[in-house]
Amino acid sequence: MTTIAYSTFVDMHGLLFAARGFTNRSRISNSDVMVYIAIGCLVIGAVSAGLYFGNRAYHRWKTTSHGYLFRALCGIHHLPSSARALLRQVASHHSLPFPTLVFIDPAWSDPSGLGALGQSRAEELAAIRKTLFG
């Protein structure tokens, strides 16, 4: 036998041996298959339910948070991003717990009560006050 023929014979014999060994393995019963399918369905169901309820909770939190309300009020009044940032600075200066409180009372955005911030950006604060409170 040549080397090529011998290696082909060994490969074929190995495949035959592997095929015989595979058929002699213990088989999985139908009840085991059903258990595995049921476990897979439960896992898929649990992951799907977790994603569904997690997504609902995230969107409920996102649309009822103070940050969302601030962005929505700024959007309703068509305030640019610089005005939004200034209103956040005003809320921070007054240590307001929620930045949306600056939309309630015009006294919060009064330049005389803001120190250096109010003096340097008085014109912009006046324009914001006019937009918000008329």
Image: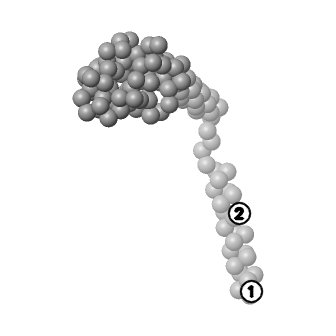
The picture places residue 118, in percent across and down from the top left corner, at 30, 29
Residue 119 tag number: none
Q: Earlier in the sequence, mark 1 or mark 2?
A: 1
Q: In which quarter of the image is residue 67?
A: top left
In this rendering, position of residue 84 left or right of residue 96: right
What residue is shown with label 1?
A: 1
- Between the residue at mark 1 and the residue at mark 2, the CA separation in whole angstroms equals 20 Å
Q: Is mark 2 on a helix, strand or loop?
A: helix
Q: Which amino acid does label 2 sit on?
A: Leu
Q: What element carries label 1?
A: loop
In this rendering, position of residue 15 left or right of residue 58: right
- In percent of the image, x 71 and y 63: which residue is there? 16
- In percent of the image, x 66 and y 63: which residue is there? 17
Closest to the observer, 74 or 7: 74
The correct choice, above or below, for 105 with respect to 30 in the image is above
In this rendering, position of residue 23 left or right of residue 124: right
Closest to the observer, 105 or 26: 105
- In percent of the image, x 50 and y 26: which residue is there? 79
Whether residue 113 is visible, yes or no, is yes
> Disc 1, disc 2: CB below 8 Å?
no
What residue is shown with label 2?
A: 16
Whether residue 62 is visible, yes or no, is no
Closest to the observer, 102 or 109: 109
Closest to the observer, 24 or 110: 110
Q: Which amino acid does label 1 sit on?
A: Met
